[in-house]
Image (cartoon, rainbow, N blue to C red):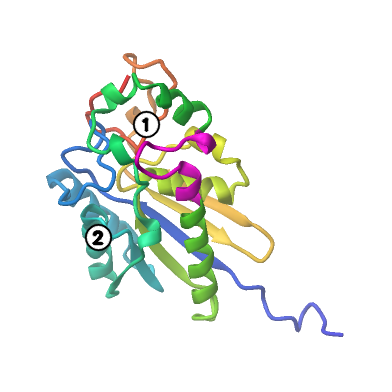
Amino acid sequence: MQSTAERPPDPVVTLILLRHGLTERTGSTLAGRAPGLHLDDRGTAQAKDVARRLAGIDLTAVVSSPLERCRETAHTVAAASGREVVVDDRFLECDYGDWTGRSLKDLAEEPLWRVVQAHPAAARFPGGESLAEMSNRAVAAVRDWNDHLVHTTSTGPVYLVCSHGDVIKAIVADALGLHLDQFQRLQVDPCSLTAVRYTSVRPFVLRLNDVGDGNAAALLPDPGDASGDAAVGGGAGAATEESPR
């Protein structure tokens, strides 16, 4: 019988989740899968700052949603770490269907808005996919990447996935053992870092929505918004944004 001292360590994988940087539409409209949406000057600066913050971490892989705003953010990080970006469609933004491109303020008047807020596991976007389908594909992608990378380094792989607010929230909810109906309690700002360590027993959420600026003002409530609604699509974080309520 192998002693504890002789037993090889259990495999550990660390996933760094990065939301894309700001675009001209972030926080005012539900961009969804609309093509041709690039980082604006603020988003480009955010991506460069994230690359600086991650300098020194030997990333095993850099994976991205196929949408431009994610690929641009991921390429900035990958260039600093000497890695190529691998695109995985399973980390694509939720297909919001007919809601795509519409003002969040207008969408807040739709009956489906309350379902998205209070019972997201039951929400299906007209002409698009359900939040449950989005969650299932993203979580399955994480499992596949973990299995693929787990034996690539002796110390355990650390890889980065650049994706979208709701996708990242769904992955974190799974790591925390939360029902999808609870994922609207999480906040993931543009270019924030979230880290999850996967062990053979359970995941550990090491960091959530870390924007690294030490801006305590971002913790203060917005006096103009006491609705308690989550920002569908992720919102613009501490950046100026049009309230969807």
Q: Is residue 58 left or right of residue 39?
A: right
- Considering the numbered disc 2 on the image, is that residue within a helix, a strand or a loop? helix
Q: Which residues are magenta?
A: 120-135
- Considering the numbered disc 1 on the image, is that residue within a helix, a strand or a loop? loop
Which residue is tagged 2?
A: 71
Pointer 1 local density, CA inside 10 Å: few below 14, some 14–19, many at least 20? many
Residue 48 in sight in this render: no
Taking the spot 32% from the left edge, 58% from the top edge, the residue there is 65
Taking the spot 27% from the left edge, 55% from the top edge, the residue there is 70
Spatial CA distance of label 2 from label 1 is 22 Å
Q: Is residue 3 left or right of residue 99?
A: right
Q: Nearer the viewer, residue 55 or 124?
A: 124
Q: Nearer the viewer, residue 38 or 125?
A: 125
Can residue 132 be found in the magenta stretch?
yes
What's the residue type where badge 1 is placed?
Ala
Can residue 45 be found in the magenta stretch?
no
Pointer 2 local density, CA inside 10 Å: few below 14, some 14–19, many at least 20? many
Q: Position of residue 98 (x, y in %)?
A: 29, 36
Q: Earlier in the sequence, mark 2 or mark 1?
A: 2
